[in-house]
Image: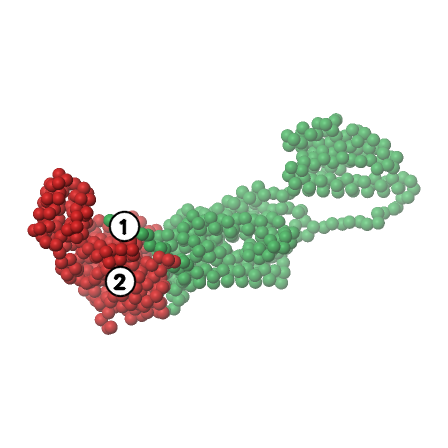
Chain colours: A red, B green
Amino acid sequence: MADHSIEVRALSKRFGGFTAVDAVSFDVGRGAIFGFLGANGAGKSTTIRMLCGLLDPTSGTATVGGFDVGREPEMVKTVIGYMSQKFSLYEDLTVLENIRFFGGAYGLSANAVQARLPWVLELAGLNGRERSLTRTLSVGWKQRLALGCAVLHEPQIVFLDEPTGGVDPASRRRFWELINELSSRGVTVFVTTHYLDEAEYCNDIRLIHGGRIVAGGSPRRLKEEIIRNPILEVATDRAVDALEVLQKEPWVLETSIFGTALHIGVADEAEGRRLVLRRLALEGIVPERVDRIVPSLEDVFIHKIEEQAVARPDGGSPA
Amino acid sequence: MNPRPLAFVGPVMRKEFRQIRRDSRSLVFMIFLPAFLLVMFGFALNFDVKHIPLAVVDQDGSRASRELTEKFAATEYFDIETRLDRTGDVDGLMAREKIRAALVIPETFSEDLLAGRSPSVQFLVDGANAMSGTTAAGYAASILQSYSQRVTLEGLARRGAGGLTLPLKTDVRVWYNPELRSAKFLVPGLMAFILMVILTTSTAFSVVREKERGTMEQLRVSPLPSVALIVGKLVPYVLISLASAHLVLGLGWVLFGVAVKGSYLLLLLAMVLFLIAGLAQGLLISAVTETQQVAFLLSILTTILPTFILSGFVFPVRNMPLVIQVVTYLIPAKYFLVALRAIIIKGAGFPAFWDQVLMLAAFAASTLALSVALLRRGSGVGGRRPLRRRAS
């Protein structure tokens, strides 16, 4: 209990007849970087909004920092920081004015904000731009400033809802360094994303699909334990044609497409390679290469979704 | 952590002031648009009927008929535009709006008068504009009335019944606005109307903008109490619109000669309450809308027409059907107008309109409470439903 920052038990949210989050349960350890992964509409934002006290759960319970989100939402607000995908800053205020205002909104005194200011400016890399209007900043800067504003009051737990949308790769990398730094100071970071490669930065992740958690664990465990069959990468400039042909074959366990490459799951590496080459040759497709790869989280995700679709052919509508 | 809700008001207020200052368009909108509208409406909305162009068709050409014509020319209500020989010409002139009224004195006018018969004088009015038409006919009737009284008395005197007086003498006096100038009546109404529209719209905008940009969500996740947010937003807008109201008041005095006859402090009290009511209405709108377009539409719909038509600004409330009269209780401008006219025009004291001030305060308080409750609950229907999309 004591080493969990967040505890979620059978949390559900329904909007009319639509179940956005379906009896989700998990724990988040103190100081963890917890990744909540899923496609748009899988229920990530709904879950985060319930945990921040923005939405009332339909059923189930959740505690955040020891406070019940349904019964003590005002207490929850004092221990969390939140940053949405919109980087909600006042664009018509300067960097400094935004920091001062959010400090005030978190109940910090002017002196406390002043004391915290150098840290936030350093974190956001905005030294020397304190008086710039926020709207003139690039997206990466806005993102870091939004994070700085969200942690002004030194919360125990930070919720980041799709924090890297629309941000260039260099800024994304820098942002994840900041998240690591927060985590090393003991701050629990709860982050949602649909960039599966970002999940590699997390210590603990949950895959959510259609409002349900379909897999969880550390990225390493997920990749090693969930996909036990080999994954072959087939590189060809006729990837779409190849996909159409291969996904009809009974010996192909799963397929997905990544640009000009296909990932296909087979039972055995050597046998699979032979079958792929023979089948594609019938279509006149000669792949540039067929290699066994270490599965990515994306493969894990697709594997779990296909597994679920087989198990629940009626309910497993892709979100 | 600072637990007192009031401590949160300061940061919100400073932020609002900064935002308003940076957004020069909304500042102009709030301060100068009311003044500009007052000038526009003040000159355009003129219910005074004066200098009505009149055609005289004097078929008699006698001393008596000239005397009657003179009576018309002597008032400021009618200007004799033309003298015609034939009644048939009146039609064309009136159609082209060269004249608005015509006085037709028959050939037998003086003859009938001398003989003691009642001659009939015809007065034709352009009724296309019902309001000025009715007024013109009223003026004409009273001129003719007083002329015929005089003729009657003179006739009686000639027959040796001198020293007779009429049994009833009317002496009509108009109080508070002796010249019956519509400006005096309109300026307070315009003030209420303009301030209501501008205030409701700008407050609704300032909140809905935060919803659209996501900053409202950010604030709802912070410990900032919603009361502090609303008070912090209200104060700057009340101060700015108070300045705007004074500008309107000053212009009303300079341009239309409408000075404040009563107590300034009472006026200030009524204004502040009214401004809060307008802001509260804007907040209420922002609590139930998600986009600036919808907020704008609702603000306009719930202010322009109701304030113009249902507040007693142009049409007296007591002449309305009962159902409509009940609706007028929801229009804050109605209470404000009664108080405003009492203070500005009549110079009346608090006892004359305390009930209106009370109603205004009640409207402001209940609307504010409702919007705080709605805004605290969030967007109402439990947030947006997530979009269903396939992963890329």
Dot 2 and dot 1 residues touching (CB under 8 Å): no
Please state, as top left, top right, bottom left or bottom right, where the N terminus of chain B lies in the image.
bottom left
Q: Quadrant of residue B6?
A: bottom left
Q: Residue at 10% x, 54% y: name it.
A: A268
Q: Residue at 85% x, 35% y: name it.
A: B113
Left/right placement of residue B60 relative to residue B299 reads: right
Q: Residue at 57% x, 57% y: name it.
A: B329
Q: Nearer the viewer, mark 2 or mark 1?
A: 1
* Crowding near the residue tagged with mark 1, few <14, some 14–19, many ≥20 C-alpha atoms within 10 Å: few
State the SS at label 2: strand
Report the residue marked by disc 1: B390
Give the farthest residue toward the bottom: A2
Q: Residue at 67% x, 47% y: name it.
A: B179
Q: Which chain is indicated by disc 1? A: B
Residue A125 point in image, percent of width and height: 22, 55
The answer, for residue A188, to whether it is visible in the render is yes
Give the farthest residue toward the left: A270
Left/right placement of residue A57 relative to residue B289 reads: left
Residue B281 point in image, percent of width and height: 49, 56
State the SS at label 1: loop
Looking at the image, is B249 positioned above or below residue A73? Answer: above
The answer, for residue B235, to whether it is visible in the render is no
Report the residue marked by disc 2: A158
